[in-house]
Amino acid sequence: MTATVPVIPFVAREVTPEWLAALRTALPEARIVPFAETTAAERAAARVAVVANPEPAELAELPALEWVQSLWAGVERIVAELPESLKVVRLVDPQLALSMAEAVLAWTLYLHRDMPHYAAAQARVEWSPRPMRLAQERPIAILGLGHLGRAAARALLAQDFPVMGWTRTPTEMEGVETFHGPEGLAEILSRAEIAVSLLPLTPETRGLLGAEALDKLPKGAGLINFGRGPVVDVAALAERLSDGRLGHAVLDVFAVEPLPADDPLWRHPSVTVLPHISAPTHKASAAAIAAGNVRHYFETGEIPALVDRTRGY
């Protein structure tokens, strides 16, 4: 790094001591300061900022800003709120992928081994065994084969599930049957007994899993949404769960979070509601990734791989 200690504004709607401590530990050669505590001179000189749900008006007060490092993997809010001229780097954290793979495996097994049925049977004080299916008899579809999707696919393959994957454009992954585009989506859904959405929220994915797509799933199929809430039409989903066309849904992400107390999803017998915990950001790990990106930039002048504004991630 340069001899001058760089000041890195931390621009966030909520600046916690834990995040500041993690970032300062990971990047001790810089001075990381909440935006509100920066001086006018520091704001004028800042070339990079670390952000978490930033206020656009605050970033606008950093005239020399070249790029921002997001602490979240999902960047749809930043992309929507910040000017197109501002370069954005999202968090790509191997630990996040491992956490997501763990969650996908756990909740896939939850559906595969009929846990919702047994929980309901216990509530009825009813001894109600069901025949067991082998993992290799249960095709799983992963929608989205980025870093998170590939890690999840590997975890499922290790348990002998037949794994399929869908992306908007062609891709390949060893051991995974891949599909792409609208026709591929229809095909993969028609064959999936459990569909797992890890899709980011973009104009193309908003409402992608609506009535038409959900009707492609086999009768009794399960759905796991660990990507973004608005990808799924929850009204259409609830209707198909209520009439038995679909079996059970595990939902960890919603259009409004926290999910309002009066939302009927809380009480739907065929829905498991999770409070956005499938792959929480690990502060120390995320801070280390962000610090590495910032350090490399100050050493080489190279900005890390940017969010593609046309794709939304």
Image (cartoon, helix red, strand yellow):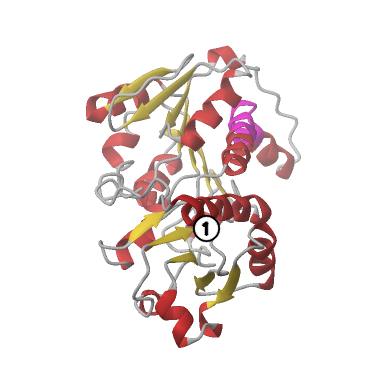
Residue 267 seen anywhere in this rendered image of the structure: no
Residue at x 23%, y 25% (from the top left corner): 183
Residue 215 place in picture, x, y as percent: 32, 33
Residue at x 32%, y 28% (from the top left corner): 216
Nearer to me, 91 or 28: 28
Residue at x 39%, y 40% (from the top left corner): 240
Residue 233 place in picture, x, y as percent: 35, 48
Q: Which residues are magenta?
A: 105-115
Q: Left of 62 or right of it: where is 105?
A: right
Nearer to me, 13 or 44: 44
Residue 106 place in picture, x, y as percent: 65, 34
Task: Give the secondary structure at mark 1.
Answer: loop
- Above or below — where is 231 with respect to 256? above
Label 1 packing within 10 angstroms: few (<14), some (14-19), many (20+): many
Which picture quadrant has residue 76?
Answer: bottom left
Residue 48 place in picture, x, y as percent: 44, 65
Which picture quadrant has residue 66?
Answer: bottom left
Q: Is residue 111 magenta?
A: yes
Residue at x 48%, y 62% (from the top left corner): 263
Tag 1 residue? 71
* Magenta residues, dominant SS class: helix
Nearer to me, 278 or 133: 278
Q: Left of 55 or right of it: where is 210?
A: left
Q: Left of 251 or right of it: where is 168?
A: left
Residue 210 seen anywhere in this rendered image of the structure: yes
Counting the numbered discs, the total is: 1
Q: Amino acid under label 1?
A: Leu
Q: Quadrant of the N terminus?
A: bottom right
Furthest residue toward front: 3
- Above or below — where is 212 with respect to 92? above
